[in-house]
Each structure stands twice: as C-alpha cells, then as structure tokens.
Amino acid sequence: PCSMIVVASRNVSHTRARATMSEEEYSEDEDYVSSDGEGVEGTEEGGEGQPAQAAAPVLGPKEWVGLSSMPAATQSALLETLGKLRERNVNEMTVIFIGKQGVGKSSTVNTLLNERVAPSSPFQPENVRPLLAGRVAAGFTLNVLDTPGLLEGDSVSARGLMALRAALNGRKVDAFVFTDRLDTWRVDNADKAIFTSLAENFGAELWERTVLGFSHAQTTPTDGRPYEEFVNARVEQYRKAIRSTLNMPNLALPFALIENGSRCKTNGNGEKVVNDRPWLSDMVSTMVEMACSKDGYEYDHGKAGKKLDPNNKHKIWILPLFLFQAFVLRPLVIGQIRRDIKKADEKKQRAAAAKH
C-alpha cells in the first residue's frame, strides 16, 4: 500500500462513497505531511494547531523521521516494544484508530508518528476517506490508519462505516484503538449504536482486538476523587456498556491514556506523561500486547459489502411488499369499497321505499 491516503475538503454523498480504493486512487490524493519532513507535535482535535501542508505523494512506507526527534527514552522504549514483534519474526504492525468525531484520533496519529500527517485543526474539515501513514524504523514497519468519525448527528454514519470498510479491505489489522474522551462522563444511545454497528458490519472479532483509547487524559477529577479511581471508573463504565450492548461479557478491552495537548506534563527524560507514566510508550506497548495475543483481523468484504451500502438497506422487502399490496391489500380494499357502496345504495333504496 502507499504511504498515505487522504482527501481535502470535498462534499461526497453517501451513495458515492467507495468501498475500495486502488493504489492509483491513493496516489492521486493530497498527502498531508510537514513539508520539511521534520516531526511536529500533535494537538487535541478541537484545539489550536496550524494547518497541515500538502506535499507530493510517495508510494510505499517512509522512513520514520519523527522517531529521531522524540526524547531518547521514548525512542528506546518504542524500539524495544516493537522489538517484541520482531522476536516473533513479525516485521510489521497495522493499527486503526476509530471512533466519533472530535475525540482526538487524528491528533493521536500525529503524536504517535511525531509528524503532522493528519489534519487536526478545528478549521479543517474532517477527512471523508481513510488516511494511511506507513513508517519504517530499524527494519520494522508501523502502519497507522486514521478514519472518519462514525457519527452524524445522533445516527451512525453510513459514510464513516464505508470509509472504515475501505481502510480494512485487503489489509490485516493487528489492533484497533476505539478512541473517546476521558473527561466525558456518559455513554449514550448513539455510542451504543456505534458499538452495535461495528459488530454487525465487521464482526465481533473487531472488538476482540480493540484497545480503548481515552484522550484528554490530563484532566482533574471534578469530584476530588483520586485520579486512578477516576480513570478506573470511566474505563469500567465504557467496558460495561460495550459488553452489555454486544452481549459479550468476556471482552478484555485493555485501555490506554492519551494526552496530545502541548501542555502535557513531561518527566525528567522529556517524555510526555499522564499520572507520572509515559503515555505514548504505554499506548504502543498495549497495542503490541494485543498484536501478540491475537491473530490479525482480516475483513471479509463479501460478507459486509451490501450491509454497509445505504442504497441496499431493506431492499429485500421491496418485492414481498409489492406482492402483498397487489394480491392481498388491494383486493381487500377494493372489496371493502364495493361493499360500502352496495350498503349505501341499499340504504337509499329503503329510504325511497319508505317515502312511498
């Protein structure tokens, strides 16, 4: 696959969203990356940030130049963690970030790679197609995919589902990161609809390979409780909602804390930390543990293709409903009308006979 896929601001209708994209289509899209190739800090979606610059698309994974500008402790931790896969003769890992709009997916991709590959400014429209960034370091390839939000208003986005299908088609995925905000204290019906739609359209296997990512993690509990207790309560709330909605009580759903903001605290080694833990290294470690514990997820395009197409929704009922209307409902209605007319005529005849 090519190094990146992304589109600039375009109005694309649900019916025109494409299920698959060829390598030629990838290479035609604008490639959002810092023009000088140097790493840049990510910002939380909805926060401040400079617009990404467009550069010429490049086929194949790029060298992970952003890694070299990370703190030395982070570089060492990441290479050591990814080395666990190399010990298993695995030289590649693919991770997909999914979730609603504005929760920090794109910003987390930028922070992970230490490059601005995904537009995350509030003044930039959301991608309507998936973005793939492949990076190579020490002979290991890390593929990271950012996907459009899965919610439109209060409903699950058909366009978002089809974009995710495009990202999955023909690709083996080692881990999904379902992203939401740590400082949002609710799981509503729209969230549960997303849980269900992902399972129905992509199979329960997706959730078995999912890590919960909680952004905006550098937050202060409003009720004064200890931070760890606050985090555990939010995580368990989310786990319980997913498990009960999908009727899958044994889902593991490990989690990772995320803080992309420029005000994130740092430790003595210069690493960004949440609750005194280097969150980026911990997040990648959780992804690698997921990749080691499960075989990669492979999407079956044939099984879910029709379900994701909004034009095919409920089409199976068209012929039965037509036949029911033509051969059952229509005769009943016509028969009732004729009986009503006959009764009306008989009533008039009786009334006329009574007058005479």
Image: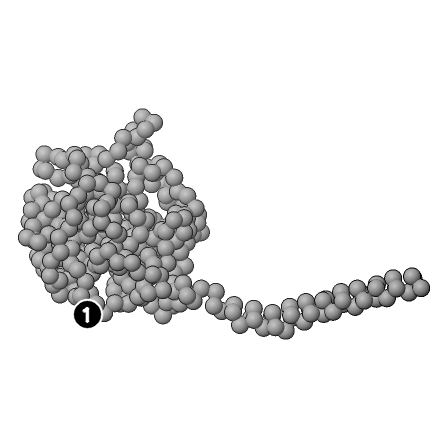
Q: Which residue is drawn at 36% across and 64% down?
A: 15
Tell which of 46 and 41 is nearer to you: 46
**Residue 57 occupies which quadrant of the picture?**
bottom left
Q: Residue at x 19, y 40 (%)?
A: 48
Task: Please state if 175 lies on the left or on the right of 271 as rendered.
Answer: right
The percent position of residue 289, horizontal first and vertical second, equals 24, 51
User: Camera-side residue: 99 or 9?
Assistant: 9
- Whether residue 44 is visible to the viewer of this picture, yes or no, is yes
> Is residue 46 depicted above or below 343 in this figure?
above
In the rendered image, residue 68, in percent from the top left (x then y), is placed at 6, 49
179 vs 332: above or below = above
Q: Is residue 230 above or below residue 87?
A: above
Tag 1's secondary structure?
helix
**In the rendering, at what x and y percent does residue 307 appear?**
41, 64
Point out the residue furthest to the right here: 356
- What is the x, y in percent for residue 16? 33, 65
Mark 1 closeness class: few <14, some 14–19, many ≥20 residues within 10 Å = few
Residue found at x 13% / y 65% = 59
Image quarter of the C terminus: bottom right
**Residue bearing mark 1:** 24
Q: Quadrant of the N terminus?
A: bottom left
Give amino acid for label 1: Glu
The answer to whether residue 128 is above or below residue 241 is below
Q: Is residue 73 left or right of residue 324?
A: left
